[in-house]
Amino acid sequence: MPDGHRYPAEQRDAVYRVIAERRDVRRGFLPDPVPADVLGRVLAAAHQAPSVGFSQPWDFIVITDRARRERIAALARRHRDEFAADLPGARARAFDRLKIESILDTPVNIVVSCDRTRGGRHTLGRHVQPRTADFSSVLAVANLWLAARAEGLGVGWVSFFDQRELAAELGLPAHLEVIAYLCVGYVTDFATEPELAIAGWARRRPVSWAVHAEEFGRRGLPGEEPVDPLAEVTAAIGPPDAAAMTAARERQDRMTKPRGSLGVLEEVSVRLAGLAGSCPPPLPEPACVAIFAADHGVHAQGVSPWPQEVTAQMVANFLAGGAVVNAFAAQAGAEVTVVDIGVAAELDPVPGLLPRKIAPGTADFTAGPAMTREQATAALTAGIEIARDLVAAGNRCLITGDMGIANTTASAALICAFTGADPAGATGRGTGIDALTYARKIEVICRGLELHRPDPADPTGVLAALGGFEHAALAGFILGAAALRVPVILDGVIAGAAALAAAALAPDVVAACFAGHRSAEPGHAIALEYLGLRPLVDLGLRLGEGTGALLALPLIQSAARALRDVATFDSAGVSDKL
Ligand SMILES: Cc1cc2nc3c(=O)[nH]c(=O)nc-3n(C[C@H](O)[C@H](O)[C@H](O)COP(=O)(O)O)c2cc1C
């Protein structure tokens, strides 16, 4: 029997049970001391962890002294405050409610360290990958955490420390690194879900997203067909919930205000309820704008007065916090994420930048397809995954942003392809071009449409022929949000073109879309009309980046909050109109 060494069912169940029920605990600790024999068993379990070359690089520093814990708690508090100061509005409020350490609430703290030099230079495995020493100490933490759960002990991991400050407090020799600071004690209760999931800060990714067959990207569980993220999201997108919409309309009519007096915002709240399938719907916060940046081969046709390098330069500006989108996001309390989906430059890794480059810019669509079908699918999939990850990270409203010199040309071409509009009517002046360039831009779009004769029934083919990587990725982003029933606020003409592609793939996607504003680009109005979306703001903006959508964020949030918070005539005892 190949499974002859398997444990009896009851023991196996106990192993899986301790794995499932291990929790990071921060609340409800009891002051009772942990008996030495129990602590000894837990530490012995930690010490049995696997380690690279059997180097056993860990040490365990057991801290019970109150004064020392008070000094350490002060260090953690300082870093907590620094982190909080960096968070956008809704995130900062949510973080305020979170408990992130229990240094003083627990009777014992244990520091797990790592000696990256232990065993000398011939430690098996570590010579190629020095990080394996740290990995080994982490495995000791995992053993400790599981054994503690079996003993009924809660463990909370605190990482709000500066290495050097903490090392000095603990008298750690210079060659030792702190791997984990753990707070350990008996508890009133173990939560069934991670505290951060209960608090709505983040949610668990489904295991099927994390398992790949043979190659990265072929997602699927063993024994099941590989999942195609695009097919999965288009299948998951359904119509809005009619009952929730009816409930929202009825509630709007009973709210202490004249019927219909919130105008368009009443319909916004009804649509949010329909999307969420509940009345009132959850507040669309925290919100995150994802700026998809890419370059365009059609730039070579002289359709923009700006050099192509500006795309990469603006990406640097977004990441440095110096663009209009940063100012508007800060004002609206939204987070900014930048995605390199196809910038024609090498970008250094920095926090806030998601490196998802499909290729350094598309090809010129007047000479051939802008991208291959595989590239279009890869960009769509990247957009889907970014939407999923941002929602898993706790965002409840996604906002489209874009950056790409010459992307209004690709947008106008896509809008013509999907709606049948005439290029002369759908093409705008982008960042501002003279009459000659404008005429050339229209002619370039006509040539592209003539060359590819795009079939709107094949949206991926249309994106591949004429689109930019940011259009394809934004289409995926919009689909990903809709599949999770999270609202997505569309910015201007680039998002409008992408939404047309998304709607061609899954018509019900429109239920998740809110048009942030109407841009000055004529193609945008055509796209919104075609999608049946009413823009919330109309200020003649033509910047892109996500700026127009960010201005609409407080409107959409206010619509949701009003539906949730405003009293009704019956509840407030206010007389209704006769
Ligand atoms: C490397 C690491 C560092 C962590 N640091 C902190 C921390 O500073 N504060 C905190 O409250 N939780 C911290 N946690 C706990 C995680 O937030 C927690 O494990 C996660 O939410 C999953 O919940 P669960 O452990 O209950 O399944 C840390 C966890 C790990 C693995």
Image: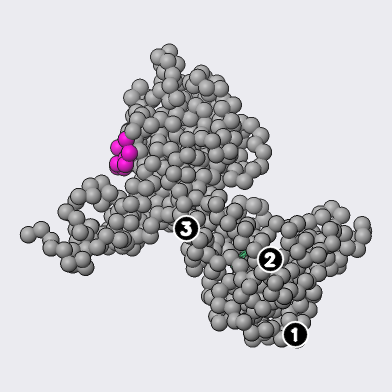
Where disc 3 sits, the SS reads: helix
Label 2 within 8 A of ligand 1 by Cβ: no
Q: Which mark is residue 93?
A: 3
> Picture coordinates of residue 66 (x, y %)?
69, 74
The answer to whether residue 4 of the structure is visible from this angle is no
Name the N-terminal-most of marks 2 and 3.
2
Where disc 2 sits, the SS reads: helix
- What residue do we see at 55% from left, 32% from top? 314
> Picture coordinates of residue 392 (x, y %)?
52, 58
Label 3 within 8 A of ligand 1 by Cβ: no
- What residue do we see at 92% from left, 57% from top? 121
530 in the magenta segment: yes
Where disc 1 sits, the SS reads: helix
Q: Nearer the viewer, residue 326 or 80?
A: 80
Residue 402 vs 150, above or below: the answer is above
287 in the magenta segment: no
Please, what is the three-letter code of the amino acid marked with disc 3?
A: Arg
Q: Where on the picture, by quarter, is residue 421?
A: top left
Q: Main secondary structure of the magenta part?
A: loop
Q: Which mark is residue 168?
A: none
Cα–Cα span, label 2 and label 3: 25 Å
Point out the quarter of the image occupied by ligand 1: bottom right
User: Mark 2 sits on what residue?
Assistant: 72
Please, what is the three-letter code of the amino acid marked with disc 1?
A: Ala
Q: Where on the picture, by quarter, is residue 110?
A: bottom right
Q: Which residues are magenta?
A: 528-538
User: Mark 1 sits on what residue?
Assistant: 36
Cα–Cα span, label 3 and label 1: 40 Å
Name the N-terminal-most of marks 3 and 1.
1
Please, what is the three-letter code of the amino acid marked with disc 2?
A: Ile
